[in-house]
Amino acid sequence: MQQSAVPELALTHTRPIHWVATATAVAGVIALTSVVQPGSATAAQPATGTEATSAPAAMAPPGTTGVHFPLQCGPVKAVVVKKATGDLDGDGRPETVAVVHCDAAMGTPPDGVYVLTRGKDGGTARVVATLVDPKDRLTVTEFALRARAVSATLLGYSTADVPSCCPDVKTPAKWQWNGSAFVRSSPAAAHSV
């Protein structure tokens, strides 16, 4: 048998008092972290000679419940099928982008894509922009909001003779706020489905 080169450790057996001390220390750290919270972070310092104002409290993104969408659905109601939230215009308040269509019992109703926001006072949500009008007979797929831009794949029709069940054109689209309006760009050319 080979002898160990490491000397015997004096405290090789733990006793209940060691576990009690460890549990007390962990409980103390947890209690302290729940009481002590860091201050809010700021990205930049105010310019010299200007008064510093605190940033508005984190505002919840606008919800879609109770919003009147500019969509003519007749006897059926409008249904929000997809939504995403983010700060599209860089003002520090989140917007909501909603894909909405009529709740039709049959067929593929066209989608509308709407941007919702709240006033500075945090009031009720309202539609401020229409990115896709249902009158264009488009269906929205692969919908996302990233890096202050809305992107989607739009399924549409090459002619008015194509049945609503079977869109034959697929177009990627992207919208971005330019300071006064949402500008649409198509990353790639439309192609047949």
Image (cartoon, rainbow, N blue to C red):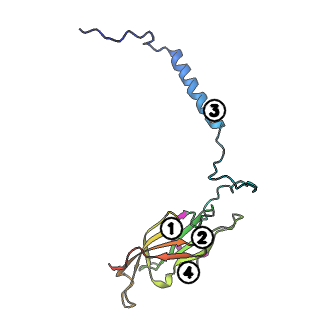
| Nearer-N-terminus badge (3/2) | 3
- For disc 1, the neighbor class at 10 Å (few under 14, some 14 to 19, many from 20) is some
| Nearer-N-terminus badge (3/4) | 3
Residue 123 in the image: x percent, y percent?
69, 66
Which numbered disc covers residue 116?
A: 2
Residue at image point 55% right, 77% down: 130
- For disc 2, the neighbor class at 10 Å (few under 14, some 14 to 19, many from 20) is many
Residue placed most toward the observer, 187 or 100: 187
User: What residue is pinned by disc 1?
Assistant: 149
Magenta residues (range)? 68-85
Q: Give the spatial CA distance, label 1 vs label 4.
A: 23 Å
User: What residue is pinned by disc 4?
Assistant: 71
Q: Which quadrant of the figure has residue 56?
A: bottom right
Is the residue under label 2 in contact with that under label 3 (CB below 8 Å)?
Answer: no
Q: Which quadrant of the figure has residue 49?
A: bottom right
Q: Is residue 32 magenta?
A: no
Nearest-to-viewer mark from 4 and 2:
2
Hey, what amino acid is under mark 2? Leu
Mark 2 element type: strand
